[in-house]
Image (cartoon, rainbow, N blue to C red):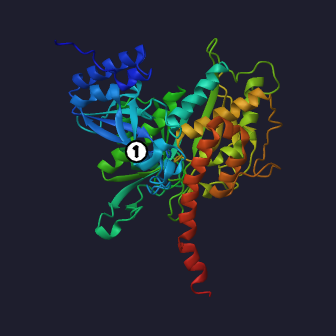
Amino acid sequence: MHRDHAPSLSFAERHGLWTDDREKGVSQVLAEIKEHNLAVVRFAFPDQHGLLRGKALTANEVGNALRNGVMIPTTMIAKDTAHRTVFPVFSSGGGFGMPEMQGASDMILLADPSTFRVLPWVPNSGWILCDAYFADGRPVPFATRQIFRTAVDRLADAGFDFIAGLEVEFHVFRLVDPRMQPNDIGQPGEPPTVEILSHGHQYLTEIRFDQVEPVVELLRAQIAALGLPLRSLEIEYGPSQLEFTFSTMAGMAVADAMVLFRSAIKQICRRHGYHATFMCRPKFPNAMSSGWHLHQSLRKRADGSNAFASDGSPGPLSQIGRSYLAGLLAHACGSAALCTPTINGYKRYRPYSLAPDRVTWGRDNRGSLVRVVEGVQQDAIRLENRIGEPAANPYLYFGSQIFSGLDGIARRLDPGPGSDTPYEATAPVLPRTLSEALQCLRDDECLREGFGPTFVDYFCKLKQAELTRFDLEVTDWEHREYFDLF
């Protein structure tokens, strides 16, 4: 006797992830793929460094993948910036104390339909961001996008939305030699040979802008086609250095925009004979450090108003704003490793450089760690945290701000007086090295609770692996200092 079998449930359905919004989003994605006659869709996962990893699927496989996910090895979240696997994945628990991570087993990437984009620089290709889950439907605890979602949800429970504007500095060079000979292979390989597009040191001059306008226009057109809210394109102070700024976005959208922007810039430049880098301070004579200044405020969910706008409290900030600011200051040293996660980034923290070197705040003062910006529009007041480097993982950078600010609000902290001379103020000094910053993070109970001690220990182990490799490397400085002298 023949019996009909009920169709099996998809991964998303089995684990309560198939919502009405997801179903509607999946239908829209499939319609766009058909409308644009796409051949391939990239399923992208932002890893622990904020780098995108994943797989490209042919269009006829996308429908199934949107319901059942895409499998990739869990080793993707066990790698440092050289893509070396730091954890002993073939030992018991995979080095994480978790059987799900053992043996280079798979995790499942489930796409977020709201992030879908058609890539304007790649023929017939789409792109979509994913979240990582174990086979039993649990979120992977080391996936930074989910961690940031936890911070956003916690902020929402307190009655606020996170609003941020991106202000990102980076370098674009002309590619001379991509260094693709066999003897250039390594882990990492030899970096490319480049030349500058402009001499720099003529900040915001029209002449310098016009010299690089062909590259800037190329990037502007492609970023605009992605639908990102690009606001300005500026010549920065250093040679071959640019700054792009974006209009404000809320919550997950602003972090997702940053990982897409950074990856897009590098891909577009490489396809046209340029090399873009978000490394903080390239090793070139007279190069300038790149920063990532984060403009942020809180929006009241009850009425949509700016929670930082003056409520009669002394100074330009409301009591909520002052307490949030105080939280940023209280946890500035602990959050440094999340905002400046590379060894190179600490070369930027120096006095009288438009980058912070200690924990201060000031009204419209670019030497302060946190700058209170009142803006020209009514109720446009915001905080500009100048701690970050452009290589930071945005989910961790933004998460550190939310957890720090919420702690300030919960404890009604006061930031104290601002400083008009931030480089001369008596104030705690920011960590001078990544090693110092990691210890500050380990010691910060608020951030350990917010991100979870398991994640903090994991992150510190990854970064310690980079430090260990760095400490074993003989540098140019050592050779120049000691080879002749001794």
Left/right of residue 299 with respect to residue 229 in the rendered view: right
Residue sitting at x 63%, y 11%: 303
Position of 27 relative to 102 (above/below): above
User: Nearest the camera: 265 or 439?
Assistant: 439
Quarter of the picture containing the N terminus is top left
Q: Is residue 268 left or right of residue 81?
A: left
Q: Is residue 161 left or right of residue 82?
A: right
x, y percent for residue 385: 65, 39
Q: Which residue is mark 1?
A: 105
Query: Can you tell which quarter of the image residue 321 is in?
Result: top right
Residue found at x 67% / y 26%? 381
- The quadrant of the picture occupied by the C terminus is bottom right
Residue 159 occupies quadrant: top right
Q: Nearer the viewer, residue 411 or 192?
A: 411
Image height check: is 5 above or below 87?
Answer: above
The residue sitting at the left extreme is 1
Residue 258 pos. (x, y %): 48, 37
